[in-house]
Image (cartoon, rainbow, N blue to C red):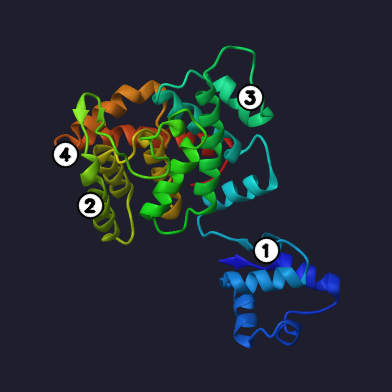
């Protein structure tokens, strides 16, 4: 749902009402009805109105989600509120997801980067810092676009956000924001051949889209198959876990955060997927309990 209270405030400042926009901008009465009913306007219409009111497009509306957890995250993000659910999600998911992949940053250092945009004087790899900042931005991207349908383009853009400007991005064979060119392995197990990746990803997306209303088990299954394909040269784990955050928020499911302390259970779950699915499902449900503890901290009902 779209809320246009900000638009009404702008119109009040000019001493006009919504109906006047039909005369001033040539908008149809149907468009005005959409505003009254909280429906989405086309981007062109939003830009025409914002240009007339001399403001940015985001200053005249806001998206209101039926998912109250997603709405809390959006409101806190947009208002720059510190010390809330959004703040803790950023720090805890970024720390744990990056640490699983080998980052040397502690949770305290991750928190410092998010809160102050600074870091202590310790010797820390530049990529660890870059990928931490990038992960914050990737979570923002997920929150802003959680209710959009999952696409390969969305997944590739997450990879672009995570890996841009890193040392990997300077390698001629490493493609940031696109699928891998070289064979890679995970946990000693070979993943999909680069030539197979587009076909396998297309098939995975088609199979996933067959179920309209997703359960947490559907999302976990997608995650396991995504990691089996391992479509990118590097960054697959972080991108995969960001996808699970997006899809949980999309389908009003409490997200899960895989803690670094549980990474060996997580790896076992991924390795045994297809023969012992319960390992990964139990680990992700444990991660869901971790997220529930954040909701309890802030007395958010679920």
Is 15 placed above or below 75 here? below
Kindly report which numbered mark, 3 or 2, lies closer to the viewer in this rendering: 2
Q: Give SS at disc 2.
A: helix
Q: Quadrant of the N terminus?
A: bottom right
Question: Where does label 3 land, which residue?
Answer: 112
Q: Percent from the top left, x then y, of residue 295?
A: 53, 39
Instruction: Please give the label number shown on residue 57.
Output: 1
Question: Where does label 4 land, which residue?
Answer: 274
* Residue nearest the viewer, comparing 69 with 275: 275
Q: Is residue 220 left or right of residue 155?
A: left
> N-terminal of the two: label 4 or label 1?
1
Q: Percent from the top left, x then y, of residue 191?
A: 22, 35
Kindly report which numbered mark, 2 or 4, lies closer to the viewer in this rendering: 2
Q: Are marks 4 and 3 in contact (CB under 8 Å)?
A: no
Question: Where does label 2 land, which residue?
Answer: 199
> N-terminal of the two: label 1 or label 2?
1
Is 212 placed above or below 74 here? below
Instruction: Please give the label number shown on residue 283.
Output: none
Is 34 placed above or below 2 here? below
Q: Give SS at disc 4.
A: loop
CA gap, disc 4 to disc 1? Answer: 47 Å
For label 1, the crowd category at 10 Å Cα-Cα, with few meaning under 14, some 14 to 19 and many 20 or more, is some
Q: Are marks 3 and 1 in contact (CB under 8 Å)?
A: no
> N-terminal of the two: label 3 or label 2?
3
Kindly report which numbered mark, 3 or 1, lies closer to the viewer in this rendering: 1
Q: Is residue 238 left or right of residue 301?
A: left
CA gap, disc 1 to disc 2? Answer: 38 Å
């Amino acid at each position: 749902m779209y809320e246009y209270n900000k638009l009404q405030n702008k119109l009040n400042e000019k001493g006009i009402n919504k109906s006047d926009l039909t005369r001033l901008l040539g908008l149809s009465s149907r468009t005005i009805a959409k505003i009254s009913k909280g429906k989405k306007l086309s981007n062109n219409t939003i830009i025409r109105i914002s240009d007339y009111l001399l403001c940015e497009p985001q200053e005249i509306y806001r998206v209101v989600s039926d998912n109250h957890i997603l709405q809390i995250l959006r409101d806190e993000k947009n208002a720059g509120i510190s010390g809330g659910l959004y703040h803790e999600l950023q720090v805890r998911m970024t720390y744990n997801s990056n640490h699983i992949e080998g980052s040397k940053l502690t949770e305290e250092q991750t928190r410092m980067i998010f809160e102050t945009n600074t870091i202590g004087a310790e010797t820390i790899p530049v990529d660890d810092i870059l990928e931490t900042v990038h992960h914050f931005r990737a979570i923002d991207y997920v929150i802003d676009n959680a209710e959009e349908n999952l696409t390969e383009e969305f997944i590739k853009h997450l990879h672009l956000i995570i890996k841009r400007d890193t040392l990997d991005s300077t390698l001629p064979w490493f493609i940031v924001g696109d699928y891998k060119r070289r064979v890679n392995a995970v946990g000693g197990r070979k993943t999909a051949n680069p030539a197979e990746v587009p076909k396998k990803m297309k098939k995975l997306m088609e199979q996933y889209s067959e179920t309209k209303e997703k359960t947490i088990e559907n999302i976990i299954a997608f995650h396991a198959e995504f990691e089996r394909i391992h479509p990118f040269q590097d960054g697959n784990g972080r991108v995969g876990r960001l996808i699970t955050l997006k899809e949980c928020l999309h389908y009003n499911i409490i997200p899960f955060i895989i803690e670094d302390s549980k990474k060996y259970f997580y790896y076992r779950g991924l390795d045994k997927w297809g023969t012992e699915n319960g390992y990964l499902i139990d680990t992700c449900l444990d991660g869901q309990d971790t997220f529930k503890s954040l909701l309890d901290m802030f007395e958010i009902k679920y």
